[in-house]
Image: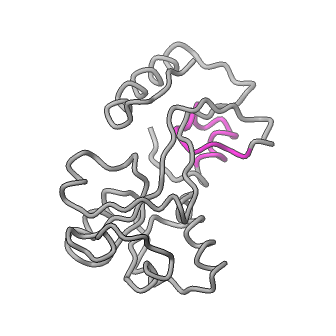
Amino acid sequence: MLARSYQPLIPLLRSGKIDLAFCSSPPTDDSDLEFNELFTYKPVLVTPLGHRLADGRHIELEDIASWPLILLDQASLLRERVDRAFKNRWLAADVLFPVDDTESMKRYVDIGMGIGSGNDFALGADDYQRFGVVPLDHLFPGSEIGVCTLKAKFAGQAVCNFVAIMSEQIRDYHGEVRSWK
């Protein structure tokens, strides 16, 4: 099992080095890949508790740009969307450094190094007590997470069992997880 961002996963899937990927949906015009959605997610801003950006008011990119940012690495779909939004608005983001996963981002936010952007599916119930969590779906689109496979590749029983078990585990974070075919 590999934990990777979207960009490196798809070539591994295409090459046959991995059987499937839990990832965001591929482009709809990609006829080689099959995608079965499990759940949708939304981008969120994660701040220390009591941070002024988490006070309930509407925030814009300009508000976020004035703080040091801890973002996922550039291979992630959300990072790509954040970078594009900043560029389109001619804003400079003060990115401290990229992180590989949301847990690392939360750790740095927790010790006061900056604010972070992540996806709501990566937050546990206790995170909403530890951090200020602000929806950002008005700035960056959400997406879907699902199982991506090669259309022509047979998924054996072990793969199907693995997906069923993982889907059940994911359900603990997202109650609306759909069953995998």
Q: Is residue 3 above or below residue 20?
A: below
In the image, what residue occupies the spot 72% across and 35% down?
33
In the image, what residue occupies the spot 44% across and 23% down?
162
Q: Is residue 95 above or below residue 33?
A: below
**Percent position (x, y) of residue 26?**
68, 44
Name the quarter where the C terminus is drawn. top right
Q: Is residue 25 magenta?
A: yes
Q: Is residue 110 left or right of residue 42?
A: left
Q: Is residue 20 left or right of residue 109?
A: right
**Percent position (x, y) of residue 152?**
75, 24
In the image, what residue occupies the spot 63% across and 81% down?
89
Q: Is residue 10 magenta?
A: yes
In the image, what residue occupies the spot 61% across and 29% down?
36
**Percent position (x, y) of residue 116?**
37, 69
**Percent position (x, y) of residue 8?**
59, 53
Toward the viewer: 121 or 101?
A: 121
Q: Is residue 154 left or right of residue 133?
A: right
Name the quarter where the N terminus is drawn. top left
Q: Is residue 74 above or below residue 122?
A: below
Q: Which residues are magenta?
A: 9-27
